[in-house]
Amino acid sequence: MRKAVPKDIPTLLGLMSEFYAESGHELDHALAERAFAAILAEERLGQVWLIDDENKNVGYLVLTLRFGMEYGGLIGCLDDLFVVPPSRNQGLSTAALTDVRDFCKASGIRALTVEVGFSNGPAQAVYRRVGLTAAPDRQLLALALARPTHVI
C-alpha cells in the first residue's frame, strides 16, 4: 500500500467507478475528481492510499478526519475501501486496514470509525478483524446537504 498523489487521480477514479458499479451506482467523475484533488491537497482532511498487489493497483482506501469531543481529538473515518474482485480474499483489505490503524495510532488519531451496510457481511468481517465493532448504543443518521458522487 502506498499513499496516493495527485497523478494517481485517474487510477483512483477508475477504481471508485468500479466500486460504485458493484452497488448499481454510476459515478459522477467530475465531482469525485474534485473530491480526490481536495483531500490529496490538504492532509488535514485525510489520506488516500492505493492498494498494490504485485506492483499493480488493485484497490484504494480513503481515510477522512474529523474532530470528536467524545474522544477529545481527531477521529479517523474509513470512508472508502475497495479491492477489485480478482484480488479479494488474499488478505489485502485486512493488511491495508492494519496499516491504516497503525498510521492512526502513530498520528495521534484517537478513534477509528466506518460505515458499513447491514447486509454486507464480507466487509463487516474484514473490519472486525482489525478491531472495529458495532456501537451497541448508536445509529448513524444522515442528512444529505448536497448530492453524492454517485448518480441516483
Image (spheres, rainbow, N blue to C red):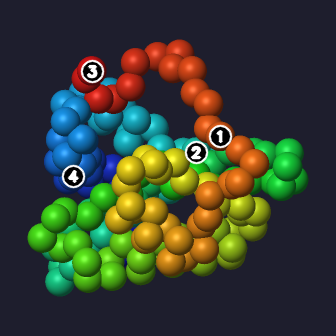
Residue 53 image-quadrant placement: bottom left
- Which residue is depicted at the point 53% across and 16% down? 145
Label drawn at residue 66: none
As helix, strand or loop, the secondary structure at mark 3 comes to loop
Instruction: Using the image as rendered, state which of residue 65 and residue 121 is in the foreground.
Output: 121
Q: Earlier in the sequence, mark 3 or mark 2?
A: 2
The quarter of the image holding the N terminus is bottom left
Residue 50 in the image, given as x and y percentages of width and height: 32, 64
Which residue does the image show at 22% across and 33% down from the upper left? 25
* Label disc, if present, on residue 152 of the rendered structure: 3
Q: Are marks 4 and 1 in contact (CB under 8 Å)?
A: no
Mark drawn on residue 45 = 2
Q: Which residue lies under the disc numbered 1?
A: 139
Q: In the rendered image, which residue does mark 4 sit on? A: 15
* Kind of residue indicated by mark 2: Leu
- Find numbered disc 4 in the image and state the secondary structure of the residue it sits on: helix
- Structural distance between the alpha carbons of marks 2 and 1: 24 Å
**Mark 1: which amino acid?**
Gln
Could you tell which of marks 3 and 4 lies nearer the N-terminus? 4
**Above or below 34: residue 88:** below
Secondary structure under badge 1? loop
Q: Quadrant of the C terminus?
A: top left
* Helix, strand or loop under label 2: helix
Q: CA distance from mark 4 to mark 2?
A: 21 Å
